[in-house]
Amino acid sequence: MSVFKIAVCQMLIEEEKDRNLKRAETMIRESAAAGSQWVVLPEMFNCPYDNKYFPDFAEEFPGPTTKMLSSLAKELSIFLIGGSIPERYEDKIYNTSFIFDFQGNLAGKHRKMHLFDIDVAGGIRFQESEILSAGEGVTVANAPQCPVGVSICYDMRFPELVRLMTLEGAKVIVIPAAFNMTTGPAHWELLARTRALDNQVYFIAASPARNLNTSYHAYGHSIVVNPWGTVIAQADEKEGILYVEIDLELVEKVRRELPLLAHRRKDVYALCKK
């Protein structure tokens, strides 16, 4: 199947986990009812994006959030990219995306590799490393339609990671991400279009909606870019669902007509995991 439908859920995140999970379930069910075969949730969809919340909201796997995602994926026969949640593993907390297949099985997971430690004068200061630990792996999951690369937010600023996912077969890249009101207006669309264009993939960045009642104000503007670098769907800052059709033949067409991946000078430079 070369054409399939994806729903990107731009959720409003609150300070109560149960309310967030109920909202996520409602949006997932609405997405499936509309014919979506893939459903994507935003970064930290069960938890406000703030270091002070991560330890209290963190769950081991399996836990209440991932059990809900697995159950819904199986019940609705969807491929579910579960945004991300704070994951507790041993004595560490990770920002982790759990991915479930049509049978509710874990198809993959990605722990955010690059921690968001920034201090922009007159803008924003945030230090994820005060609470979170960094993941290590490049994540490409096998959906029925095609391989999909998954990473999280700040990861999208690192072209090497996105290229590695592409070289491992990804034709769609999905990034649950919560850019803020400093970095979002400046870089969000630019980065999404650049990563799609450089790797000739569909690039999907799924943001939370902007909640002015929480300490962190997400930019919103969830976006889908095609392999030619064209924005084919973009939200505003409010809660809602983006529906898009992915055409894998377009990926092949663009790569055939402008074969930049084939033209890489591997005799001069190479990209490796270590």
Image (cartoon, rainbow, N blue to C red):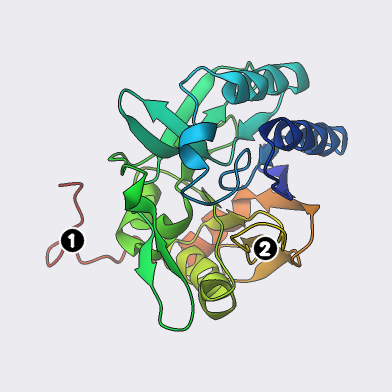
Residue type at the position of mark 2? Gly
Of badges 2 and 1, nearer the viewer stands 2
Q: Residue at x 63, y 56 (%)?
A: 207
Whether residue 113 appears in this view of the structure is no
Query: In the rendered image, which residue does mark 1 sit on?
Result: 266
> Callout 2: 10 Å neighbours few (<14), some, many (20+)?
many
> Callout 1: 10 Å neighbours few (<14), some, many (20+)?
few
Tell me the element at label 2. loop
How far from the left and from the top, in percent, is residue 200? 48, 61
Residues 21 and 190: in front is 21
Q: Quadrant of residue 2?
A: top right
Tell me the element at label 1. loop
Residues 258 and 226: in front is 226
Taking the view exactly as shown, the residue that stands out farthest to the bottom is 122
Residue type at the position of mark 1? Lys
Q: Residue at x 51, y 21 (%)?
A: 106
How far from the left and from the top, in percent, is residue 22? 77, 31
Which quarter shows the N terminus?
top right
Residues 213 and 42: in front is 213
Sequence-wise, the earlier of marks 2 and 1 is 2
Task: Give the Cα separation between the discs numbered 2 and 1.
Answer: 38 Å
Whether residue 188 appears in this view of the structure is yes
Q: Residue at x 72, y 65 (%)?
A: 234
Q: Is residue 82 left or right of residue 132?
A: right
Q: Is residue 257 left or right of residue 34?
A: left
Q: Quadrant of residue 222?
A: bottom right
Q: Residue at x 71, y 32 (%)?
A: 21
Query: In the rendered image, which residue does mark 2 sit on?
Result: 220
Residues 65 and 30: in front is 65
How far from the left and from the top, in percent, is residue 161? 33, 54
